[in-house]
């Protein structure tokens, strides 16, 4: 029953008959809980920005660590090394695939990268346009900027940056992003500062912890991510939580599942009701 109801008002719509999305305990009984329509809209908008930030930062982590190690140990950092590490992270390690889809034009430690026929490797989404990758050393910072970058059917403007810090034994990878794009016909502003990003040694899953500020239409939200993880090739997180706080609406905790990419279903806890199930997102193609 729940699936048929929610399919009629899936993710990209703001409401179902003017109300929120019903949530279901698995028995067909929603217990009176609904996901507020503002929360549904903000959550869908948020995932699009968080996905791009994770997909553009995670693949740079390993190359950034190596660059930081070499430079801090006093090893020379010639252009061949800095450019080689950067290109490997962008189209070898990698943000995009296949490697041949990215063309580089370098000036010092900054490159304009033209993407043609590329796929965003983490999510498996087509990506095209141009990005500028600027590298700083000591500290090691990758700053990616773009205008009208096409990812799937969405055009993004903004910046994503990754800062490598800490020590060799306790490295830190700090992620920041400032993005604008459209979702469900509304302009979205996504801001992320001071988040932490991790990459698994095998499989390349990317995990983000931090707080994002998201504004879509007239709604602004604070979203706290804990262990939000994208498995390679998946457009939606496969684990972790996002706690959505919007003034005047109940706080909602969304828990992503290993099956979320396939069916769009997540566990939802709308205060003060118990956690239940809802289909908030469009499944991955």
Image (spheres, rainbow, N blue to C red):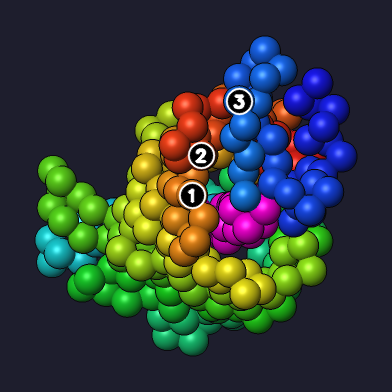
| Residues rendered magenta in the picture | 37-54
Secondary structure, mark 1, is loop
Q: Tell us which disc is closer to us: 2 or 3.
A: 3
**Circles 3 and 1: CB atoms closer than 8 Å:** no
Question: Marks 2/1: CA distance?
Answer: 6 Å
User: Residue 38 occupies which quadrant of the picture?
Assistant: bottom right
In the rendered view, tell whether residue 107 sits above or below residue 243. below
* Residue under numbered circle 2: 270
Comparing 7 with 181, the one in front is 7
Q: Given contact means CB atoms under 8 Å apart, are the residues at marks 2 and 1 in contact?
A: yes
Q: Which residue is mark 1?
A: 250
Camera-nearest residue between 3 and 206: 3
Instruction: Indicate the position of residue 158 as horizontal and vertical percent values.
Output: 56, 77
Q: 99 left or right of 61?
A: right
Which quadrant of the structure image shows residue 102?
bottom right
Q: Are marks 2 and 3 in contact (CB under 8 Å)?
A: no
Where does residue 176 sit, x and y in percent of width and height?
Answer: 39, 67
Per the image, is 52 magenta?
Answer: yes
| Picture coordinates of residue 59, whole percent (x, y) | 47, 51
Q: Residue furthest top?
A: 27
Q: Residue at x 55, y 39 (%)?
A: 237
Residue depicted at 45% across the width and 56% down the height: 245
Horizontal relation, residue 62 to residue 18: left or right:
left
Residue bearing the label numbered 3: 31
Location of residue 207 with respect to 137 vertically, above or below: above
Find residue 8 and report its image quarter: top right
> Predominant secondary structure in magenta?
helix
Residue at mark 3 to residue at mark 1: CA–CA distance:
16 Å
- How crowded is the residue under tag 1: few (<14 C-alpha within 10 Å), some, or many (20+)? some
Classify 10 Å Cα crowding around label 3: few (below 14), some (14-19), many (20 and above).
few
């Amino acid at each position: 029953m729940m699936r048929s109801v929610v399919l009629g008002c899936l993710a990209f719509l703001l409401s179902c008959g003017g109300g929120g999305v019903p949530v279901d305990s698995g028995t067909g009984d929603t217990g009176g809980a609904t996901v507020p329509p503002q929360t549904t809209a903000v959550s869908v908008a948020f995932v699009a920005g968080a996905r791009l930030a994770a997909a553009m930062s995670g693949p740079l982590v390993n190359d950034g660590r190596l660059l930081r190690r070499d430079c801090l140990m006093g090893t020379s950092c010639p252009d061949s090394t800095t450019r080689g590490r950067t290109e490997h992270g962008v189209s070898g390690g990698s943000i995009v695939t296949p490697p041949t889809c990215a063309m580089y034009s370098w000036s010092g430690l900054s490159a304009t990268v033209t993407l043609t026929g590329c796929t965003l490797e983490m999510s498996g989404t087509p990506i095209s346009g141009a990005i500028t990758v600027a590298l700083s050393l000591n500290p090691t910072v990758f700053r990616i900027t773009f205008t009208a970058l096409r990812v799937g059917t969405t055009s993004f403007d903004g910046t994503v940056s990754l800062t490598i810090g800490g020590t060799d034994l306790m490295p830190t990878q700090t992620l920041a992003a400032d993005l604008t794009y459209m979702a469900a016909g509304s302009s979205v502003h996504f801001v992320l500062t001071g988040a932490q990003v991790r990459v698994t040694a095998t499989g390349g899953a990317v995990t983000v912890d931090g707080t994002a500020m998201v504004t879509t239409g007239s709604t602004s939200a604070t979203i706290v991510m804990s262990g939000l993880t994208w498995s390679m090739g998946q457009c939606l997180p496969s684990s972790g939580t996002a706690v959505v706080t919007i003034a005047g609406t109940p706080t909602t905790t969304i828990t992503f599942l290993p099956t979320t990419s396939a069916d769009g279903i997540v566990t939802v806890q709308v205060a003060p009701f118990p956690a239940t199930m809802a289909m908030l997102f469009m499944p991955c193609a």
